[in-house]
Amino acid sequence: MRQNSRVEQAVGFLLGLVDGATAERVRARTGLPPTESPEDTAVRVRRAWTWATHLPASVALWILENDDPQLNAVVWRHIPTDAGLRRAISRGVPFAPGRTGTIPVDRTLPGAEPEIPEAYVDHGLVGSLRAVTSMEAGRAAASMVLTRDDWRAVGETDSAFPLPGYARWALSVRPDCPPSVRAGFGSHAKFTHRLRQAGVFDGPADYVASKVPAVQVLEVLAMGHVLFPARVREAEDTLRPLVQDHLGDREEAWAVLAQLIETFHGNAPELVVTAGAIA
């Protein structure tokens, strides 16, 4: 197999779902390097600093849920247009469920908090959301929703009298928007499509089954044990039965998968099934 770090990462993630002996045989058959050792964790975090892979909004949130200043700084580099998350990171807002107070901010954070919108200064949180008349204004107002109390206020306000459409849109595509608040914004097909375009998923299983190309999903998941360990297990549980049923210990099936993965347009489950069928 041609050496390609992206393919190595993606196939390596799937090989982690079979027993060690099978994985090593497949690595030898396909030309993949040996399994990385645990002490390579720090190296993998440093690699994430220069990661070229697109980081879906929900994956960014799963990383932030660690409340690790170093990982937060990694996320910062991948969310240049998400003023809300950047503002929260710079203020030490925690993302782990149930955590309160603030967390330390990495001293090497490469940037400052985005500018505070004038509408927020003039009208406050709810007032600035009510005054939204464009998507740009919606994003600016939504960027000031940071804490759980803020989100609670947004939900109560929208329930009492619906917020403007652009404000709802900007809030809904925030990955940290609570599911209960997002559900109040609607469930129309166009609404769901916007969420998918923004990279917002209900969870790792939803991400795995999405239309995102297999190599892209698997490369992200390959970093999961370092970047979002509490979430990656759900993705593993979703893919493990498929891998065992369609690839298992069949070295030829794994070789086909390694050849297909870079140019395959379907999602991860479809890749696994297709490789097994071809072999």
Image (spheres, rainbow, N blue to C red):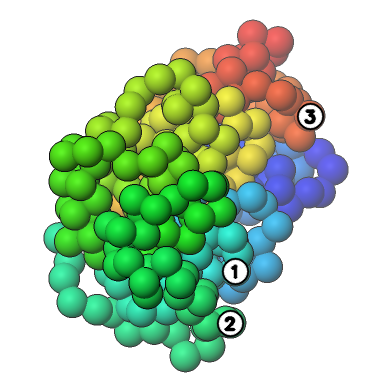
Checking the image for residue 77, the label placed there is 1
Q: In the rendered image, which quarter contains the C terminus?
A: top right
Q: Residue at x 42, y 78 (%)?
A: 90
Disc 3, SS:
loop
Checking the image for residue 25, the label placed there is none
Residue at the extreme top of the image, as rendered: 277
Q: In 3D space, how far apart are the residues under numbered discs 2 and 3 (Cα atoms)? A: 34 Å
Q: What's the amino acid at mark 3?
A: Thr
Q: Residue at x 57, y 40 (%)?
A: 218
Disc 1, SS:
helix
Residue 233 on image: x %, y %: 35, 43
Label 3 CA crowd tier, 10 Å (few <14, some 14–19, many 20+): few
Q: What's the amino acid at mark 2?
A: Pro
Q: In 3D space, how far apart are the residues under numbered discs 2 and 1 (Cα atoms)? A: 8 Å
Checking the image for residue 263, the label placed there is 3
Q: What's the amino acid at mark 1?
A: Arg
- The residue labelled by disc 2 is 110
Mark before the other along the chain sequence, 2 or 3: 2
Q: In 3D space, how far apart are the residues under numbered discs 1 and 3 (Cα atoms)? A: 27 Å
Q: Point out the frontmost of discs 2 and 3.
A: 2
Q: Residue at x 51, y 75 (%)?
A: 114
Labels 2 & 1 near each other (Cβ < 8 A): yes
Label 1 CA crowd tier, 10 Å (few <14, some 14–19, many 20+): some
Labels 1 & 3 near each other (Cβ < 8 A): no
